[in-house]
Image (cartoon, rainbow, N blue to C red):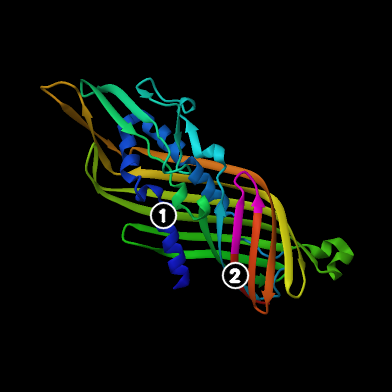
Amino acid sequence: MIMRKIITAFLVLFLFFKATNAQELETILLAKEDAQKLTKAYLKPAFKGFIYSMNNGWYHTAKVHKKFGFDITIGASTSFIPEADEIFDIRNIGLSNASTFDRNTSPTVAGSNDGTSATISYQAVVNGQNVTADFQMPTGVKEDLPLSAVPAPSIQVSVGLPFKLDAIVRYSPRIGSDDVKGRIFGIGFKKEITDWFGVIDKTPLHISLLAAYSNMNVDYIIGDVNGEVSTRDASAEFDLNTYTFQAIASLNFPIINVYGGIGYNSGNTTLSMLGDYTLTYETGNVAVPTVQETTTDPFSLKESAGSFNATIGARISLGFFKIFGSYSMQEYNSLNAGIAFSFR
């Protein structure tokens, strides 16, 4: 039940256009060929933040379990978006000549919700008519996010296997609300190599190699929308894949465990808007004041990110109960914390 509540809350939080900015994001579709570029520039920091957050939390010690020992870990990560990524420069995203704007910069989703966003003016020919559409870019949701950062859950089970190997599994079935449903799956392997270094094997120092992959898939029902952009039974799909490769070490004492690692985190995301969207444009012609055009599956946004990282953390052991926290330095610095129930 705890796991279900954590993941459900995260799924509702994760789709930013589900909140107050929903109508503004859909209005961007009026820019037609420029809609994908504007939406991607707005959401890019969130995509990258999810990649770095989901790559966290795979370990809180380099020491592996004994054969068939296991632990259950419940944690959360959050990635801090640099101030430079709280805005984007509209001049640098390759808009067509059909789109003009009243200011050069506008907030991304990571920006402030009380900032000033740009107004986009789109002029084109639709169904033989010269049309115009003016809309304002959405502001950010920085103040609505925990720690003003992008969060992600990390709920997993680690099991000891032969040859000083741990298998780590993240899993959640498809759960959520009526309009947002998602699942999480991940798998990783941690191989302890302390005995490769001779006498170190007799000290509290443990050294391991870690490789892990995780996937998050979310379906969001946009539903019925009326206005300049209208739709019936539209939806969106989000897919996230992350990969991490780490060399990790820990000093394991009876109560305090200090751990850290260096490695590389990467991943990719895809956000697709699906369904039929009817766009309404003004013509300035009294005889034909508006014209409409329908677009199907208007775009699929793809984003990738990757960065070398260094992590430092500490864990307190109270018998089988563990409390841990770590900080990772990378393109988007990340904080991870949680609890574990470990039975070696």
Residue 320 quadrant: bottom right
Report the residue that reaches farthest toward the front.
114
Q: How many marks?
A: 2
Query: Label 1 crowding class (10 Å Cα cut-off): few <14, some 14-19, many 20+?
Result: many
Q: CA separation, marks 2 and 1?
A: 26 Å
Going from N to C along the chain, the mark reached first, 2 or 1, is 1
Q: Nearer the viewer, residue 276 or 18?
A: 18
* Overall secondary structure of the magenta section: strand
Tell me the SS state at disc 2: strand
What residue sits right under mark 2 in the picture?
339
Nearest to viewer (mark 2 / mark 1): 2
Q: Are marks 2 and 1 in contact (CB under 8 Å)?
A: no
Q: Where is residue 251 drawn, in percent x and y? A: 78, 66
Q: Is 184 displayed left or right of 71 in the figure? A: left
x 53%, y 54%: residue: 147
Is residue 326 visible to the viewer in this orientation of the structure?
yes
